[in-house]
Image: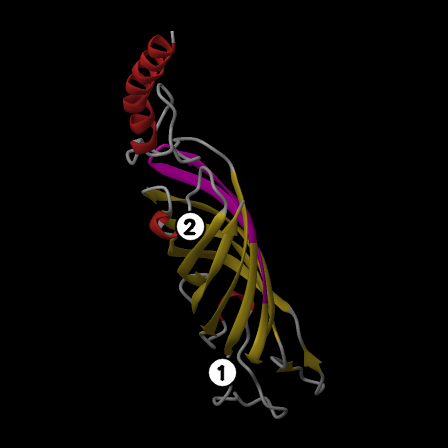
Amino acid sequence: MRTLSLALVLAATAFAAPAVAQDMAAPAPTDNSAAPGEAAAPDGSKAFGIEPYVGIMGGWEQFDNVGNHGIPRALNSDGSVRNNYRADGALVQGVVGVNVPLGPVFVGVEGNVIKGVDGNIDWEYGAAGRFGFRAGDSGIFYGKVGYQWVNFDHFAQFSTNGGRTNRDYNAVTYGIGAEVGPQSIGLKGITGNAGFRIRAEVNTFGTAQSFRPMLGIITHF
């Protein structure tokens, strides 16, 4: 009896060992991989989803001081043009938005608030739509179009009675950019697994009347 029991144990062990080894060798599926039969992007990640995100960026912007889009030339008290005035400055920007992946592409909307920290730009705020291509599940290349409001600190035009006028200026804005967050270091993509991406973009105001390069971090969840 003891011999028979030992034989049964050895047989069960020999049968189970290959199955256990196979399970251990198989890689665990990632949260953002498409399930069998589910629509997938070209890289095998989920094709559809909704991704809210927030971010912070830093950069710089310079406006053409030529009176476009209602932005007047900076004048001295005698009415002469202040040729040494530059409508530019360093900026800190906060963004909040949502992406909607659609297979190999995506669409989204985004709002922004900008504070000038050095120079003559005081505040900016606006909203834009984004659209572009997914680079795997952790990168995107995009274009954006929206509307932006700008307020200049100390930017004033002297009136005929010597008073100063300050106001907001607004126009269409557009730009291009990219975000990168390699899966290999745990920065997952836009259909699952919260993480961080590095964003770089360039925007302009009106008919190319400003140049605003920005760089920052986007966190999605």
Boundaries of the magenta span: 96-114
User: In front: 105, or 37?
Assistant: 37
Q: Residue at x 67, y 84 (%)?
A: 160
The residue where tag 2 is placed is: 187
User: In front: 68, or 49?
Assistant: 49
Residue 193 rendering spot, x and y as whole percentages:
47, 41
Q: Amino acid at mark 2?
A: Leu
Quadrant where the C terminus sits is top right
Asked which colour scheme the image uses, the reply is secondary structure
The residue where tag 1 is placed is: 86
Residue 162 rendering spot, x and y as whole percentages:
70, 87
Residue 144 numbered mark, or none: none
User: In front: 172, or 124?
Assistant: 124
Residue 120 seen in the current view: no
Whichever of callouts 1 and 2 sits on the residue coming sooner in the sequence is: 1
Left/right placement of residue 204 relative to residue 54 reads left
Q: Amino acid at mark 1?
A: Arg
Circle 1 crowding by C-alpha within 10 Å: few under 14, some 14–19, many from 20: some
Q: Is residue 91 above or below residue 74?
A: above
